[in-house]
Amino acid sequence: MEITERHEQGATIALLTGKMDAESVPVFNQWFDDRMAAGHTRFVLDFGGISYLSSAGLRAVLSAGKMLDKQQGHLAICGLYGLARQVFQVSGLLDVLPIRPGVAESLAALQETSA
Amino acid sequence: MSPEHSRTLFQQCFAAEMTELPRIKTLVLDALGQAGWCGDDLGRFELVLEEGVVNIVTYAYPGKSGEVMVTLSTIEGGVLLRLEDTGIPFDPVAVPAPDLDAPADDRPLGGQGVYLMKQLSSGVAYRREMEKNVLDVVMKRTLN
């Protein structure tokens, strides 16, 4: 998995590409912990490049969401397609997580939460 | 199904360690790819394989090392993935489904893997046999 990061409207936007599985999830967790430690509290996770996601990936996303909640931070998820979307859907997480179609909608949702 | 219709595509014993997961995946997926599997079918199979192996690696041998035997064989319309370990008895089929209506904050971080394995396969069966956990997962092919 690769993480390509950019910053816009006070949010950290991460484009994730490749496989988010038991092998690569520690890379994501380390990246997320580093950003949290640096004071980032608003995240957009763009799954547009994720072709494969297992329960380890789901766990990382849920865990990131819980950490952000504790810090009054905000998370938006977008770009889910194919197997990754199916995994979120089967787990019943499509309706309970803040999932948006794309980055623009995610940023708009983050703006609303801070209004 | 009569034995002449079933063919073993892959069989190998691995150390039940997380560091072995990439190698297990590569070897088993390669065998399945050579049998003509591709696309979403291959992705779903990879997920089922990962969840099954991760479960064994994480829970089967608390405080000691062990092994996992991976066998892949053909069945009508798909393949049978068999995972065997000599660890503590554990029946993943008996794990209750997560509460799909619970809000994200209330979700336990574990317990999703077994559920995904059941949902994305055509059938999961467990038995304890000769001091071994034997997990059979049937994967049907949807693409031609």
Image (tube, rainbow, N blue to C red):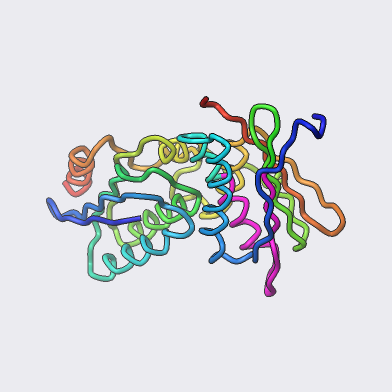
Q: Quadrant of the N terminus of chain B?
A: top right
Is residue B5 toward the left or the right of residue A18 in the image?
A: right
Expressed as whole percent of the image width and height from the top left, the position of residue B139 reads: 62, 35
Please indicate, yes or no, whether residue B99 appears anywhere in the rendered image: no
Picture quarter containing residue A86?
Answer: top left
For image coordinates 54% across by 59% down, the residue present is: B23
Expressed as whole percent of the image width and height from the top left, the position of residue A26 reads: 42, 64
For image coordinates 30% across by 39% down, the residue present is: A79
For image coordinates 53% across by 35% down, the residue present is: B37
Is residue B49 toward the left or the right of residue A46 in the image?
A: right
Please indicate, yes or no, whether residue B118 appears anywhere in the rendered image: yes
Expressed as whole percent of the image width and height from the top left, the position of residue A2 reads: 31, 56
Of residue A39 and residue B43, the one placed in the foreground of this image is: B43
Of residue A48 and residue B102, the one placed in the foreground of this image is: A48
For image coordinates 55% across by 40% down, the residue present is: B34
Expressed as whole percent of the image width and height from the top left, the position of residue B71 reads: 69, 49
Of residue B26 and residue A72, the one placed in the foreground of this image is: B26
Residue lying at the far left in this picture: please name it. A9
Q: Which residues are magenta?
A: B48-72
Residue B58 in magenta? yes
